[in-house]
Image (cartoon, rainbow, N blue to C red):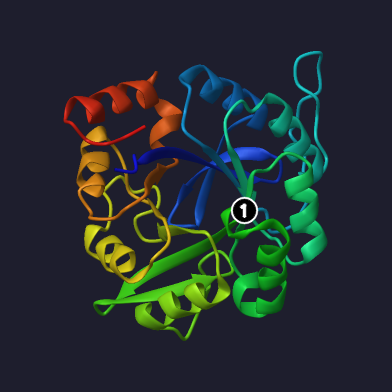
Amino acid sequence: MVKLRLIPVLYIKNGLIVRSERFQEHKIIGNLINEVRRYNQWDIDELVYIDISRERVYDSRRDDHKIKRISSIDEALNLIAKECFMPLTFGGGIRDLPTIKKYLKNGADKVVLNKILHSNKAIAKQAIELFGAQAIVASLDYRVIRGEIVFFVDNGTQALPYSVEEMADFIHDLGCGEVLFTSIDNDGMGGGYDIKSISKMVSLLKIPVVACGGAISAFDFMEAAKVPGISGIAAGNMFHFTENIYPRSKAKLKSKQLHFR
């Protein structure tokens, strides 16, 4: 049996790590290098960084002998990759093939693609041909509207004209290696995972699905882990504010005989 992954997700906005709520409210948490050092101590399965900066202006607001100040997302990735001792997934705002190549060359093991999957499908296919499906993660952000899953791009502002079945077919046709499935409405709200939508998406896809959005305790991880066929469970805000929450959650999940790494 394939073991489940428990994955922290960190959001970069203008050079700093932020706490996200429903893709709209963003509160600064701290320096992106301090965060990766903390996760190194926890021996996590994987780490995901997503750049949600809209202005593409970066300033980490610090420059000393311990942490170099950054002024670009490329500098951010280079510093993160040097510190990161676990598999690293990186994405956000990717619009062309050279950026995908650069991220993979400079330390990312996988890249996350969102809007480009739909605005320029050919680039996504080229990336998969060049680097393999395992290097390309399709980010699917969604809301439930009148009982139906509706997918969005552009930081949750632009709806896509796909049913959930059509989206599954689209992802299969592209050949992506994995899906990061994020609930916009549950993001940062601590109300638990959207189990119904996760179950639907996992049942339709033949590739690994990582669910994200809504965790506030290890109980939420347990509930998501019960979804048949799920590959991983991701969380952002929960891991920022409680000491040793990752290793304590892992221990709790394993004590319940759940198949986590």
Q: Amino acid at mark 1?
A: Ala
CA neighbours of label 1 inside 10 A, class few (<14), some (14 to 19), many (20+) = many
Q: Residue at x 27, y 58 (%)?
A: 194
Residue 220 versus residue 100: which sits nearer the camera?
100
Query: Residue 146: x, y in percent?
Result: 26, 80
Horizontal relation, residue 188 to residue 48: left or right: left
State whether residue 253 is above or below residue 198. above
- Where residue 47 sits in the image (x, y, percent)? 54, 37
Q: Residue at x 24, y 77 (%)?
A: 147
The residue shown at (27%, 40%) is 221
On-image quarter of the C terminus: top left
In the rendered image, the residue lying farthest to the left is 256
Which residue, as the protein is rendered here, is positioned at the far front?
A: 1
Compare residues 169 and 182 and report the one nearer the observer.
169
Label 1 sits on a secondary structure element that is helix
Q: Is residue 38 left or right of residue 81?
A: left
